[in-house]
Each structure stands twice: as structure tokens, then as C-alpha cells.
Image (cartoon, grey):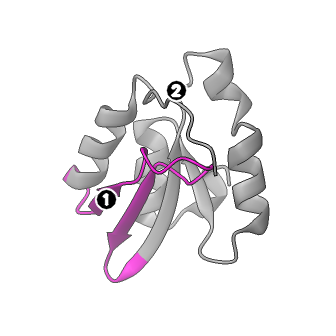
Amino acid sequence: MPRVAHKKDDNHNFIVSVLEAQGFSVIDLSKMGGGCPDLLVCKNMIIYMAEVKNPKTSYGRAGGNKRQKEFAKQWQGVPIYILRTEKDVNNLARGNFDGIPC
């Protein structure tokens, strides 16, 4: 799969720090490319995948790009959640998945 230059969203490190403060283990997959989600996270033996999006940009508010949407369509594993804010991370930590876009 061709590599594309990747730039992390401006809130990426903040979201990672909030996840870690909530007790999640975090593996940053943001350099994987090919539409792979940004993060692999785990808490209490439950694994999640997450795409970080910046709500301050139109790109971030729009959701995934073409590769990310194709990856999600073909992915047969755990759901991929979109984390934009601290509130999204708090919802994930509480198991309130209705409050987080997929």
C-alpha cells in the first residue's frame, strides 16, 4: 500500500494523555498508514481502536478520510471510535458508547 505523509491532529497528544490519565494503555498506530486508526487502547482487558479527529477543523469534524472509511468498512475486529474531545474519552472509559461516534 502506498505511503502517504501523515500529520497528527493537533489534539492527538492531548487525547492520548487523557486516555492514559483514565487508566488506558495506549499504543500509537498513527504512522501505520493505509487508513489504520490512530490508536490501539486497552483498559480492564478490553481493547478498543480509536481515530483521533480535531473538532476545530472542518477535516476533523467531517470524520474519516477515504482510506480510513475503507479500512473501517473492511475491518472485522473491534469497533473504531472517533475521539475528538475529553468528553469522548470519558464516555469510552464509562462504556457510554452511544456518546461516541463510530
Residue 77 lies within the magenta run: no
Q: Is residue 63 left or right of residue 29?
A: right
What amino acid is labelled 1 in the image?
Answer: Ile
Q: Position of residue 96 (x, y in %)?
A: 55, 62
**Residue nearest the observer in this picture, 19 or 10:** 10
What amino acid is labelled 2 in the image?
Answer: Asn
Depicted 43 relative to depicted 22: above or below: below
Q: Position of residue 12 (x, y in %)?
A: 38, 34
Q: Is residue 19 left or right of residue 46?
A: left
On residue 54, the disc is 2
Q: Residue at x 38, y 63 (%)?
A: 41
On residue 97, the disc is none
Furthest residue toward bottom: 45
Q: CA distance from mark 2 to mark 1?
A: 19 Å
Residue 29 lies within the magenta run: yes
Q: Residue at x 42, y 44 (%)?
A: 31
Badge 1 marks a residue whose secondary structure is: strand
**Residue nearest the observer in this picture, 6 or 51:** 6
Q: Position of residue 70 (x, y in %)?
A: 77, 53
**Residue nearest the observer in this picture, 51 or 44:** 51
Q: Position of residue 54 (x, y in %)?
A: 52, 26
* Magenta-drawn segment: 21-46
On residue 27, the disc is 1
Depicted 41 relative to depicted 54: above or below: below
